[in-house]
Image: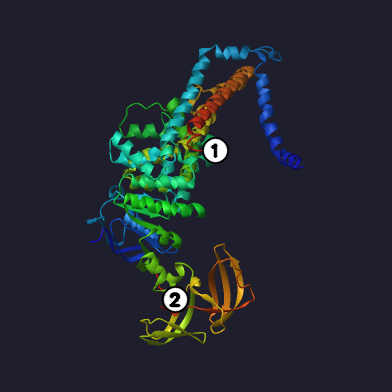
Amino acid sequence: MTGQRSWSLSAPALALFGVLLVVPLIMTFVLSFNSFDFYEGISNDISLANYKEVLGDSYFYEIFARTFAIALATTVICAIIGVPQAYFLNRMTPFWRSVMVLVTLGPLLISVVVRTLGWAILLGNKGVINTALTDFGLIERPVKMMYTSGGIVLALVHVMIPFMVLAVWASLQRQDPATEAAAESLGAGPVVIFRRVVFPQVIPGILSGSLIVFSLSASAFATPAILGGRRIKVVSTTVYDEFMNTLNWPLGAAIAMLLLLAVLVIMVSWNRLVERRYSEVFA
Amino acid sequence: MAFLELQGLTKLYNHFVAVSNFDLKVDKGSFVSLLGPSGCGKTTTLQMIAGFTEPSSGSIFLNGKDLSNIPARKRGLGIVFQSYALFMHMTVAENVAFGLEMRKIDRSERDRRVADTLELVHLAHLADRYPVAMSGGQRQRVALARALVIEPELLLLDEPLSNLDAKLREEMQLELRRIQQEAGVTTVMVTHDQSEAMALSDSVVVMENGKIRQEATPFDVYETPTSPFVSNFLGKSNNMRAELISQTPDGAIVECNGIRLESDPVSLPQGPVVVAIRPERIEIASSATDIPGRVTERVFLGSQWLLKVETGLGELLVTRRNTGHREAAPGDQVFLNWDRRHLRILPVEQKVSRT
């Protein structure tokens, strides 16, 4: 009875999950084995040809490598900025903390397209930053920031930071504030306290934050599409191009499945590593 | 000058007086407890000694030197926190070694002292465990070892036993006393638990509203409280409003609800007073000559009985040692008496404002 009831109660969520996630995923998976001909369109035969094409072409390797490099750089920078930010947040008075949490979450309240176009205005060759630097006479030719990996990382960091801050903050809240006082009483200065006591205890938070930031960055679309344009391609924009421009849906599906697989493998092994390292310490 | 001396220590938060003009002398090697209800300023006092809170005025001298301008990390005090504040990502041995590392003590010396201290707290066999895999009592010992290994001049204990269950707490009381005496370290403990304070300390400082109410040995504080607050806070006490009507060198007479009671001589002006009597000092008499009463409640506590008796003085709490006989049951008529020297006559308390 209880089993039946719990199933029926979760039925709406399961249906939503099934229709919106599982079914499209399976359809994409099947699609990735079909073949495509420029004149004939998509045919229903099953082969590994698409995967062979992707895995045998250095062009795709380059795109995958760039995608993961951008995701990794975004994750590292988010951690470097996010950890101290979360630490300060945690030490603020409740009033300022709630104000600053709102500021931190700010980027998430603005549409990703609008936000990224904002970055385009700032970073363009005739953008705000370059114009200002030229007018001040600091540079003679505009610094290239649009259509670079760096520009993409910058904009991704901006939107991913909240996820890192919130994950680290959660682990800081679990930490006993008296541990810092204890370290101080034993003779440790502020730097040593942060490095030896605070930081090690928030590593699980950094790791879970990294997981979110990395997977979201690796599959981000709007930001690389607007700031990377045609020149700096990442996996998701490549998939988009295959679907919308070349119309080679099966190849696009194969690339998408490979991205999903790669991100999954990275996440699972990352998680495994974390659990093995910390199961003993944080049970 | 005493080993630890607090002079006129005061802490104000805006207009709230957390600690007011606090004077205390602690001898080397002794164990002093600051006892009081929550909000009485005991923790603030400890925080000021530790250096985590800056006094508004007054000074702290330890072994002759003024601690005022010495930051917490340079004071070299051993502190055991209420939550233990162990470094969860370090093993027991690493936790204990932390303070020695900060003092740049070399490896072999460090290992030796860590081993010695873990031996002292009976944890040598758990040196490589992480705190998460330990019981509350064991964590408590780690915290104690971590504080003692640096050979502090002063050990500060902040409610050290409050997170342990009752049975373990009693064991740890004895253990804590043994460790403190073996290490010979001067100790100041903060607690709201009167039995803990009495069991452990050489001297108890009872605090209320940021002020010292009484400072004496546990026995003296219990036997001769100087105020109704102290008599109520340490152990159980029947406190009643009364009028001091006469006093002679032979004794004093008070009147309570129309009943005259005798006591040993006191040095108080005639007028309103509070009389206090401990429940265990009240006898149940056989003759009908004393104070009559009716039992309203009876609770069996194993080693003793707890009775509530309705009398002309008001409701009195009486405890009786369990000698293997059934005590009077609710509804029974009993007669109470006591030796007059057990009756304490105390001044009426005035409410003090803290702002």
Residue at point 44%, 59% (across, down): B196
Q: Is residue A253 above or below residue B331?
A: above
Quadrant position of residue B104: top left
Q: Nearer the viewer, residue B147 or A69?
A: B147
- Tag 2: Cα neighbours inside 10 Å, few (<14), some, or many (≥20)? some
Quadrant position of residue A17: top right
Pinpoint residue A115: horizontal percent, then vertical percent. 50, 36
Q: What number is the disc on residue B178? A: none
Q: Is residue A281 left or right of residue B146?
A: right
Give me the C-alpha separation between circle 2 and circle 1. Answer: 79 Å
**Is disc 1 on the same chain as disc 2?**
no
Q: Nearer the viewer, residue B55 or A210?
A: B55
Of the residues shown, which amino acid type is indicated by label 2? His
Quadrant of the frame with the N terminus of chain B: bottom left
Of the residues shown, which amino acid type is indicated by label 1? Ser
User: Can you identify the residue that label 1 sits on?
Assistant: A111
Quadrant position of residue B3: bottom left
Pinpoint residue B332: horizontal percent, then vertical percent. 63, 76
- Badge 1 marks a residue whose secondary structure is loop
User: Can you identify the residue that label 2 sits on?
Assistant: B342
Q: Chain of mark 1?
A: A
Pinpoint residue A65: horizontal percent, then vertical percent. 48, 20
Pinpoint residue B245: horizontal percent, then vertical percent. 43, 88
- Tag 1: Cα neighbours inside 10 Å, few (<14), some, or many (≥20)? few
